[in-house]
Amino acid sequence: MIARVGRWLFLGGFVAIIAAPVYIVIVSTVKDNAQLFTNPIGLPSPIVLSNYVRMLTESSIDTSFRNSVVVTAAAVVLTLLLASLASFGITRLTRVSGGLLFGLFILGLAVPAQVNIIPIFLQFKSLGLTNSLVGLIIINIASTLPISVFILTTFFRQLPPDMFESAVLDGAGYLRQYLSIALPLSRPALGATSIFLLVIVWNDLLYPLLLITEQSKWTLPRTLLGFQGEYLTDYTMIFTGVIIASMPMVIMYVLLQRFFIAGLTAGAVKG
Amino acid sequence: MRHPARSPVAYLFVLPAAIFFAAFYLYPAVMTLRYSVTDWDGYSPDIRFVGLSNFTRLFTTDIIFQQALGNTLRFMLVVVILQTFFSLMLALLLVRNTRGTIALRTLYFFPTILSSVSVGLIWLFIYDPYFGLINETLRRVGADGVQPNWLGNPAIALYALALTQVWFHVGQMMVIYVAGLQQIPAEVFEAASVDGAGTWDKFRRITWPLLLPTTVLVMAYTTMQSFRAFELVWSMTQGGPEGATEILATLIYKTGLLNFQIGMATAQSVIFMLLILSVFWIQRRAAALAVR
């Protein structure tokens, strides 16, 4: 009895800890500042839409949104392509050379790319890749290749060799095997990896902070960071920005819960 | 070896990714090592070799660096202890798959999909000393005298950030623990129950030892996340007040990109790199000993 009450107290307390901040953020976006400060917890009365109107008219959040979509889409697709090709190649090499190449990529798992931000900045500057969405795409690919190669190679290694045998007898080369056997069979792994990448790239603040000074090239996290200085303690505006920036991930999370949870723990669980 | 004939064509598949990785990961990593033994400012044409003097200075006279190193380790320890404990508790309470437990797991996991900046901005409001959620709640329950300046007081700011980090990722670790728990066969527990083992006995003698590989995984992952907390710290305190939340990642950024001390910043990076590698080595050794 006591154990049961304790269980629900603990779980309920955690519901409050997780949900209360989220609730406050959502209701604050339809309050004005006076309402937020006199009544931060209650429901809004009246409902105010001016935050959204102001956000969409006077800030550059729409440009940032577009930039985020471009960078995320390009980086995720290209990383998946490069990583799946590499992982397939690794499984077709001998144990020694395949293992060596795999080990090289895994090095990037141990030491995150962000340890090397200073040389990355200098390198991108000298290549003219600062203030450029292409530069952002490139660095996001480079820093997420290790985890993607890791997940996909682990998966490809589990595919039974006889699945490929009849194709080989039919004279299918590596490209054919990759395209018509390996890729279709690994849809779950590709799906998990793409969700993982989607969340990482969409939420990335470090690289735009490092490489982009022009506001017209900012992605959403960088723009949100700017709001902190621009709106100071105008939390209703800041939260409206947070909602707009988080919306795509939240919608996808609600629709694809199980896949999101599996995808975001894929790198960890498969270790 | 029943694998289809191997041919060098396979290298062509690895080539694009390898080139990318070499150019934009390995090259910067090598340059970190190279710059760390110079006093380059990022502009002058000649780069002067200064041996290990950057490193000796960091460890002997650079108080700011030493504070950041200490903060990085303290942040890691607090986050790892709290996050491992709470994620295990949640997982133990939600291990069965019912509609209710799945709904709760989905809710607890939710913050993981947000960006560090969003989480940082939300928690700036929660910690706000005047109209923040915590101090407001304290006032309402009559504790008017207790109004900590959560992020402004150097004695507690780092711990406030650690709590935010735990809020951010505890659900993710809970999911890993649930997966680990569900792999323990139910018969093991049934046999123990027949033998009259109580809840605590079962946890101590069955769950905890069998879960040890998962715990190692959770700790390793949490450690890695704590080392990557740059974005959260940068959006909340930028290392302040008085350097109380300065971690190595924020210090490297400031030294290299705001003060243009490339040599010094990359020396800090090298130490950060070695720190990360040695923490993982220690964890692996500890895991190997514990499993034995």
Image (tube, rainbow, N blue to C red):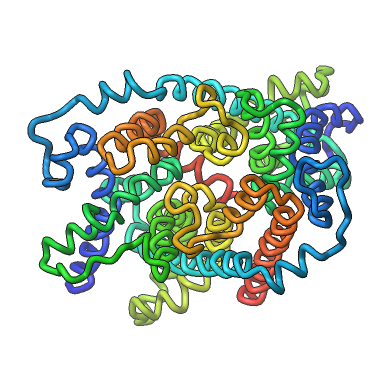
Q: Tell me, yes or no, if residue A112 can be seen here.
A: no
Front one among B150 and B207:
B150
Residue furthest out toward the left: A45
Which residue does the image show at 46% across and 56% down from the upper left? B173
Q: Measured from the top left, where is residue B288 in percent x and y?
A: 67, 72
From this view, report whether residue A179 is shown above or below residue B268.
above
Q: How many marks?
A: 0
Q: Measured from the top left, where is residue B35 in percent x and y?
A: 81, 51
Which residue does the image show at 28% across and 53% down from the upper left? B126
Which residue does the image show at 66% across and 34% down from the upper left? A139
Front one among B90 and B223:
B223
What is the quadrant of the C terminus of chain B in the image? bottom right
From this view, report whether residue B271 is shown above or below residue B131.
below
Q: Measured from the top left, where is residue B114 in percent x and y?
A: 41, 41
Front one among B187 and B244:
B244
Image-quadrant location for residue B187:
bottom left
Q: Tell me: A143 left or right of B148.
A: right
Which residue does the image show at 69% across and 36% down from the upper left? A142
Front one among B219 and A269:
B219
Residue furthest out toward the right: B8
From this view, report whether residue A230 is shown above or below residue A176.
below
From this view, report whether residue A81 is shown above or below residue B215.
above
Residue furthest out toward the front: B44
Image-quadrant location for residue A36:
top left
Q: Tell me: A119 left or right of A112.
A: right
Q: Tell me, yes or no, if residue B162 can be seen here.
A: yes
Q: Tell me: A240 left or right of A150.
A: left
What is the quadrant of the N terminus of chain B in the image? top right
Q: Tell me: A251 left or right of A123.
A: left
Q: Measured from the top left, where is residue B177 in percent x and y?
A: 46, 58
